[in-house]
Image (cartoon, helix red, strand yellow):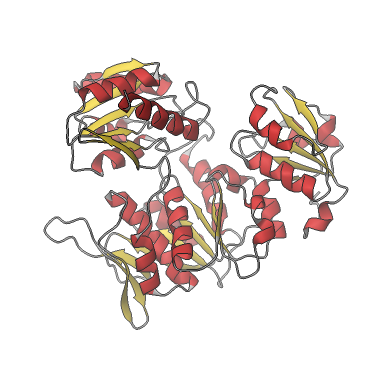
Amino acid sequence: MKFPISKPEDLRGLKVTVMGLGLNGGGLASAVFLSRHGARLTVTDMKDEAALAEPLAELAGLGIRFVLGRHELDDFSSADLVIKNPAVRPDSPYLRAAKAVETDISLFLRLSRSPVIAITGSKGKSSTSSAIYHGFTAAGRRAFLGGNIALSPLTFLDQTTADTPVVLELSSWQLADMRDLGVLKPKIALITSIMPDHMNRYRSMDEYVADKRLIYAAQDESSWTVCNRDDPWGRSFAAETRARVAWYADRDEGLPGAWLEESRNGDDRRRGFFSAEGGPEEILGRELLVPGAHQRKNLLGAALALRLFGLEAQAVRGALASFPGVEHRLEYFAEKDGVKWYNDSAATIPQAVAAAISSFDAPVVLITGGTDKNIDFEPVRAAYGRSRLLILLAGSGTEKLRRLLDEDGVPYLGPFDELGTAVDEAAARASPGDVVILSPGCTSFGMFLHEFDRGKKFKETVRSALAR
């Protein structure tokens, strides 16, 4: 059963179950939104009251029924509608008992009339999404950003209009939850680099990428699919989509879209150009605030999306020159005695660690490691040896990495099961001119709640250590 919801008033009086309150805001935003619009609400989560104390405090007094530390089948079979958290597997027996299942994203898309720019990929999607949003606002255009970047679009639905662009970062799980719902029809769909990720949840890369393909499944010739020309998967997406295709690439290949100019004298500060009808337009300047060639490529994709949406080239170029980057993604946050500290906690695959190391000409002190999610360090194993000093955090993924480091004769400190110990070692051994990066290449579970918790705790620990 697909429940007919097209406006917020349709929610009044419905019996709704929110499955998974969670710690990242999606469940909380859904509960607040549904309660405000008159739904009869049950919130259920396998975590107990102590673990969920913060979101529960925000929901106090809203007349919500809570079922914590367990799920009850009747809450699903008797509900008119179930809203699921993306982390909940779709084959859950509780979801199978439900009449209709939505997510905060699909509910937003049913109710919103805003043009959507949707972004997915393995790495770079948060930076690209944030850069697009920044581009709109810096150019004086009202816009909103939500999705996998830890902000539910339900929080700003009531502030949008048919003229308000909404930028949605979408994970493979969020896309999978919208399969066959027919609600995702982005004006622009952009896909960043595809790499092995979440292999603890998917049986193969093809299965993982099949969920990514859903971002353009309902597009037509009035829409744009933006593909990475330098990624083989990008060419596969371009061959399949029904939308018009625009490319972003490391070089000019005479295709519609955007590209980076050739490097001169080894200078990687390459400008980006757009293939306009009247000739190439510069949409990305040499001087950017964010470090690294991979970030320049992300901003090229963002610039292309903004230009396709209708912003003028000069406005795009000026706006992205002031983009400061994204929290937890090569985020510069501290400096003392000539040593700069960066938080790259969102680097949850080894390829992201390699990109972080290559972003700096300065010697790198790397804090890395964590919990395994069935990922392979082999393709980028040499990158770890390019760091001046390697400090390991304990975890099942770290144990896989250690075997490769030992084979390659790469020295390291640790593994440490205390973040404070790792930070103290880095602070004691870093020299003026070094950069210290937390770039784990693994998931955060075990020592932390999630990657954002890991990043925040890292910054707190570093600031405390540097203040001594």
Q: How many marks?
A: 0
For residue 409, say whether it is visible.
yes
Q: Residue furthest bottom?
A: 278
Residue 159: x %, y % from top left? 66, 60
Q: Residue at x 59, y 48 (%)?
A: 175
Q: Which residue is drawn at 17% across and 36% down?
A: 433
Up-down: is 90 above or below 181? above
Up-down: is 467 above or below 1? above
Q: Which residue lies furthest to the front in this view?
A: 468
Residue 282: x %, y % from top left? 30, 71
Q: Quadrant of residue 468?
A: top left
Residue 206: x %, y % from top left? 49, 43
Residue 142: x %, y % from top left? 55, 65
For residue 399, say whether it is visible.
no
Residue 117 lies left or right of residue 337; in this view the side is: right
Q: Quadrant of residue 376?
A: top left
Residue 18 lies left or right of residue 258; in this view the side is: right
Q: In which quarter of the image is residue 95?
A: top right
Q: Residue at x 81, y 29 (%)?
A: 73
Q: Which residue is drawn at 45% across and 59% down?
A: 134
Q: Which of 402 and 343 is in front in this view?
A: 343
Up-down: is 164 above or below 183? below
Q: Which of 206 and 456 is in front in this view?
A: 456
